[in-house]
């Protein structure tokens, strides 16, 4: 089983993202970073997505209860689809995992904790990607 399939299986087993053990999340970030780095994905491409995630985070914090994390995060899938359409081989593993992670963000107040974990996961992927020589 590939690293991406193992990560997806772990995410599918989780009821929601905050329920995923931090140790597993760190391992998944490591495995995903190795996979996309080997496929030739550039750090700048992951950073562009992270910028979008941070904008959503800021929006959630500013608007409070008016914007749920789940509603805002679902829109991030558009960025993933666009990136995957442009560079399928390099981006598809990242898009598959992050899309599934977004689906594990709960509605309402509980989703804020899930979104925070999602943000940390994306940051972890970038950190490991850089560690493994991604440019």
Image (cartoon, rainbow, N blue to C red):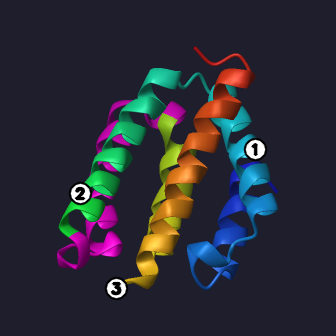
Residue linked to disc 2? 59
Query: Where residue 8 sits in the image (x, y, percent)?
Result: 65, 64
Q: CA distance from mark 1 to mark 2?
A: 30 Å
The residue at 28%/64% (across/down) is: 60
Q: Crowdedness of circle 2 by 10 Å Cα count: few (<14), some, many (20+)?
A: some
Left-right relation of 44 to 37: left
Residue linked to disc 1? 31
Q: Secondary structure at mark 2?
A: helix
The region drawn magenta spans 64-90
Q: Crowdedness of circle 3 by 10 Å Cα count: few (<14), some, many (20+)?
A: some
Whether residue 28 is visible here, answered yes or no, is yes
The residue at 57%/46% (across/down) is: 93
Query: Where residue 71 sits in the image (x, y, percent)?
Result: 27, 72
Q: Is residue 8 magenta?
A: no
Q: Crowdedness of circle 1 by 10 Å Cα count: few (<14), some, many (20+)?
A: many
Q: Earlier in the sequence, mark 1 or mark 3?
A: 1
Residue linked to disc 3? 108
The residue at 37%/49% (across/down) is: 53
């Amino acid at each position: 089983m590939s690293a991406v399939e193992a990560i997806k299986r772990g995410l599918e087993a989780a009821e929601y993202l905050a329920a995923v053990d931090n140790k597993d999340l760190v391992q998944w970030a490591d495995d995903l970073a190795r996979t996309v780095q080997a496929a030739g994905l550039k750090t700048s491409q992951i950073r562009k997505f992270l910028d979008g995630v941070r904008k959503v985070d800021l929006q959630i914090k500013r608007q409070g209860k008016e914007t749920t994390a789940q509603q805002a995060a679902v829109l991030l899938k558009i960025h993933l689809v666009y990136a995957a359409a442009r560079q399928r081989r390099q981006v598809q593993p990242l898009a598959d995992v992050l899309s599934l992670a977004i689906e594990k963000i709960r509605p309402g107040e509980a989703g804020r904790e899930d979104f925070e974990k999602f943000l940390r996961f994306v940051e972890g992927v970038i950190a490991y990607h850089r560690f493994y020589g991604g440019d």
